[in-house]
Image (cartoon, helix red, strand yellow):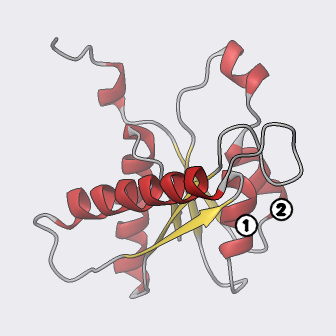
Amino acid sequence: MVGANGSLGSLTALHAAAAQARTRDAELLVVLAWQPPGGGPGTRAACGPSVLADCRDAAAELLQEVLGAFDEGRPGLTPAGRIVRGTPGVALVDAVRDPGDLLVVGTGSRGPLLRALRPSVVRYCLAHAPCPVLAVPPSPLQAVPQPP
C-alpha cells in the first residue's frame, strides 16, 4: 500500500511501492486522503454537502491522474486506488489490513516552517502502523530547477 497526493515525492514512493509489489507478487493499493476545507463536521468552518461532494470528486480525479500517469508503459501491475476522507497519516494506517502488509510513504522535502505547521505523515505511520513502513526519500530530481 502506498500513499499518494500527486506530488513528485508521492510518485517516487509509488514507484518504490510498485517495485516492492512486483518483488513480493502482491497487490498494489494506492490511497489518497482528502479533507474538506475548514475541518470536518461539528467545526465552525464545516462546509455543506455540495462542497464536500466537490472535494471528494477532486480527490477522485487526482487519484485517477496519478494512476493514469503510473500505468503508462508498466504492464503486469495494475494498482487499485482508494480515496479516504481524513488526515493522511490516519487514513493510511487505517487502510492497512494485515500485519504482513507493507506501507510505503514518501518523506517529501520539509523545511522548518512546514514541519512546524503540519505534522509528519511518515512519523505518524511509523508510530502507529501495524505493519512495516518503508519511508522513501524524495527523488534527487526534485532539487533540479524546472524550466518556466
Quarter holding the C terminus is top left
Question: Is the Cβ of the residue at disc 2 closer than 8 Å to that at disc 1?
Answer: yes
In the shown orientation, is residue 140 left or right of residue 37? left
Q: What's under tag 1, amino acid-wise?
A: Val
124 w.r.t. 103: above or below: above
Disc 2 crowd, CA 10 A, few/some/many (<14, 14-19, 20+): some
Q: Secondary structure at mark 1?
A: helix
In the shown orientation, is residue 120 left or right of residue 59? right
- Residue placed at 47% from the left, 48% from the top? 5
Question: Counting residues from the N terminus, which is met first, the one under dot 2 or under dot 1?
Answer: 1
Disc 1 crowd, CA 10 A, few/some/many (<14, 14-19, 20+): many
Considering depth in this image, is 74 or 119 the residue closer to the camera?
A: 119
Considering depth in this image, is 29 or 85 the residue closer to the camera?
A: 85
- Residue placed at 15% from the left, 78% from the top? 75
Q: Which residue is mark 2?
A: 128
- Residue placed at 66% from the left, 74% from the top? 95
- Residue placed at 50% from the left, 40% from the top? 137
Residue 39 on image: x %, y %: 77, 43
Residue 63 on image: x %, y %: 39, 60
Q: Which residue is mark 1?
A: 93
Q: What's under tag 2, amino acid-wise?
A: His
Q: Quadrant of residue 102?
A: bottom right
Residue 121 badge: none
